[in-house]
Image: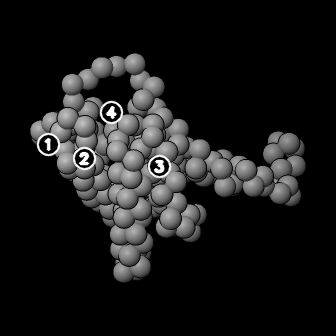
Amino acid sequence: MKARYARLGRARSPLRVRGTPIATVMLGSLLPSLIPAVALSPAVPPLGLMMLLGWRLLRPELWPLWIGLPLGFFDDIVTGHPVGTAMCLWTMVLIVIDSVSIRLIWRDYWQDWLIASAAIIGVTAMSWLFMKTFGSGGGGGPLTHQLPQVLLSVLTFPLVARQCARLDRWRLP
């Protein structure tokens, strides 16, 4: 018990405070690529996007709007999407969330889930459209193949948001 109180007066590490959210978004982008599975259609949720949304909805003051550019660039490189897809879409999502948050007096759990669900559906559909238009070989397949990924993403977002809250308590003791 005494060791716990000894931490109260300590200064927080800037790397821990600023680096944890960025590292978790980057790790979320990496995880689907590390899963050793071959699928004919996308099945793994876009964890990088979901972590970005979880942090943005939990702590709106944490990042500037332009953070979608470098994090989206990393996601594009790791996932193999055409460069600029996640950069553009993630930045647009952050701008839309910021403009929606200004209009709302308060937000609760259900509104955050609805905002994140709309963002996940919009980014997945636009990413599919970009792949269909600019991808090599006209990739993307039918849009209906995206539905399991979108459904799984929407249903698991509360778990990602909960994980962001746990990490936030860890990074800010």
Q: Residue at x 53, y 43 (%)?
A: 26
Residue that mark 4 sits on: 44
Q: CA distance from mark 3 to mark 2?
A: 17 Å
Q: Quadrant of residue 132?
A: top left
Q: Find numbered disc 3 in the image and state the secondary structure of the residue it sits on.
A: helix
What's the mark number on residue 73? 3
Q: Nearer the viewer, mark 2 or mark 1?
A: 2
Q: Is residue 166 above or below residue 110?
A: above
**Nearer the observer, 131 or 110:** 131
- The CA span between labels 4 and 2 is 22 Å
Q: Position of residue 18 (x, y in %)?
A: 66, 55
N-terminal of the two: label 2 or label 1?
2
| Residue placed under numbered mark 1 in the picture | 143
> How many other residues sit within 10 Å of disc 4, few (<14), some (14-19) or many (≥20)?
some
Quarter of the image where one finds residue 42: top left
> Who comes first in sequence, dot 3 or dot 4?
4
Q: Are marks 1 and 3 in contact (CB under 8 Å)?
A: no
Coordinates of residue 36 in the picture (x, y in percent): 40, 19
For image coordinates 20% across by 48% down, the residue present is 133
